[in-house]
Amino acid sequence: MQIAKATLSYFPLWAKGPASALALSHSNIPWSLNIPSDWATMKPLTQWSKLPILEITPSSGSSYKIGHEFAVLSHIGTLDPSLNPTPTDTVISNQLMCESDDIYAKLTKFQPTPKQREKCSPAELAALWTPSPEMNVHNREQGLHANLRLLDEFAASESSSPGSITTSGTSPGECKLYSTLRALAMIDGEVLSSYPALTDFYSKFGELEQTRSIVEGKQFHQYFIKP
């Protein structure tokens, strides 16, 4: 399918939209970012009542829209196979997306934002960031470092080259992983200090021109903050 253009709609926040923006930036798909000026009016008209939404306009045929971050990222990978060159890359990418979203879910539940500065007790927030996780407890009781440890081990075992996890190094899953790690690093700049594989990935991916265009473009501002 030849794509005339793609439009990503999302808020100007480093939350669930930047991963898709990164994937589009690393793809060969012509695209633009739409930041809604009146979300209250737009919300009831969206298929899932949430963003991000990706609208695809083919060179011929009717345009269509995709909602939900995972579906958007997966479709970008389908439209540009260079992001996931092999079936193994797709499997790795999907796992990275899922594990990264587990981190995002924990941040959403516990981590303060400018509009919600007290989501939980100080003890619960401290437990979220405990650097030495207990890996044998229920997942709902594990903090962020449990996910980071698993991701670090996974990245080290699957790495195709230093700093890359898939063959391309820019799969949709790696875009989601980088977006998630950057959200954490905005809160605590030393969060990856114990994870060499993630540190290598975060550094290499962050240095890519397509990544820098999103980060330095400053269209997405910090969402999760320190208490």
Image: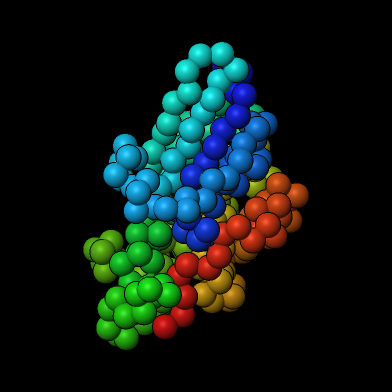
- Tell me where residue 12 appears, x and y as whole percent: 52, 58
Evaluate whether residue 88 shows in this view.
no
Q: Give the quarter of the figure containing the C terminus.
A: bottom left
Indicate whether 116 appears above or below 90: below
Q: Give the residue at the far bottom of this rendering.
A: 122
Evaluate whether residue 13 shows in this view.
yes
Indicate whether 119 appears above or below 171: below
- Could you say which is closer to the camera, residue 131 or residue 83? 83
- Could you say which is closer to the camera, residue 204 or residue 47? 47
Q: Residue at x 35, y 59 (%)?
A: 105
- Tell me where residue 35 appears, x and y as whole percent: 52, 51
- Tell me where residue 197 appears, x and y as whole percent: 60, 58
Q: Is 67 placed left or right of 181 in the picture?
A: left
Q: Residue at x 60, y 23 (%)?
A: 3
Q: Is 183 placed left or right of 28 in the picture?
A: left
Indicate whether 95 appears above or below 123: above
